[in-house]
Image: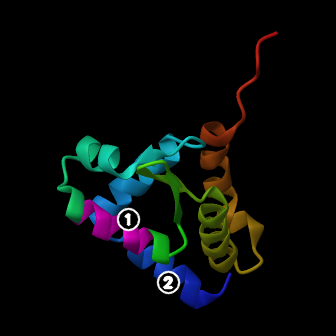
Amino acid sequence: MEQEKAILALAALAQPTRLQAFNLLVQHEPDGIPAGDVARMLAIPQNTMSSHLSVLARAGLISAERRSRLIVYRADIAALREVMLYLVKDCCGGRAELCAPLVAELSPCCTPQKVSS
């Protein structure tokens, strides 16, 4: 990931409403959420939410898909992974022991659930 792309993504997330919207979209993967529902769930006026979603989309963190009359937004998990890896790789500087505690903390939240047979 290029530094400028990482800065754009981090800047987009550096605003409370956009961070909340992004978190909400991540929680609703892979289905996504219609723009109006995102606004209602966060109690933000629709026109304001539209602006925030546009910033996240320009940063490459979310995508929009028209479904009939609705615009459904989805988090781009691959983009999130790129930003996280950029930060971790940059912070470690090739010294894995520096990031080991971070990786250990991420593992429990990101471990795939076993499917019951």
Say which quarter of the image contains residue 45.
Answer: bottom left
Left or right of 40, for residue 55? right
Determine if residue 103 is in view.
Answer: yes
Q: Position of residue 96 (x, y in %)?
A: 76, 67
Q: Main secondary structure of the magenta part?
A: helix
**Which residue: 56% across, 43% down?**
29
At label 2, the amino acid type is Ile
Say which quarter of the image contains residue 22.
Answer: bottom left
The numbered disc on residue 7 is 2
Q: Nearer the viewer, residue 77 or 50?
A: 50
**Which residue: 36% across, 54% down?**
21
Q: Position of residue 79 (x, y in %)?
A: 62, 66
Circle 1 SS class: helix
- Counting other residues with Cα less than 10 Å from the Cα at mark 1, is it few (<14), some (14-19), or many (20 or more)? many
- Counting other residues with Cα less than 10 Å from the Cα at mark 2, is it few (<14), some (14-19), or many (20 or more)? few
Circle 2 SS class: helix
The quadrant of the image that shows the C terminus is top right
Between disc 2 and disc 1, the foreground one is 1
Q: How is the image coloured?
A: rainbow
| Residue extending furthest toward the top | 117
Which residues are the magenta region? 48-56
**Relative to residue 52, is residue 25 depicted above or below?**
above
Q: Position of residue 97 (x, y in %)?
A: 73, 64
Mark closest to the chain's N terminus, 2 or 1: 2
**Relative to residue 45, is residue 96 depicted above or below?**
below
Determine if residue 13 is in view.
Answer: no
**Which residue: 62% across, 56% down?**
77
**Which residue: 19% across, 47% down?**
43
Spatial CA span between label 2 and label 1? 17 Å
Left or right of 46, for residue 111? right
The quadrant of the image that shows the N terminus is bottom right
The numbered disc on residue 53 is 1
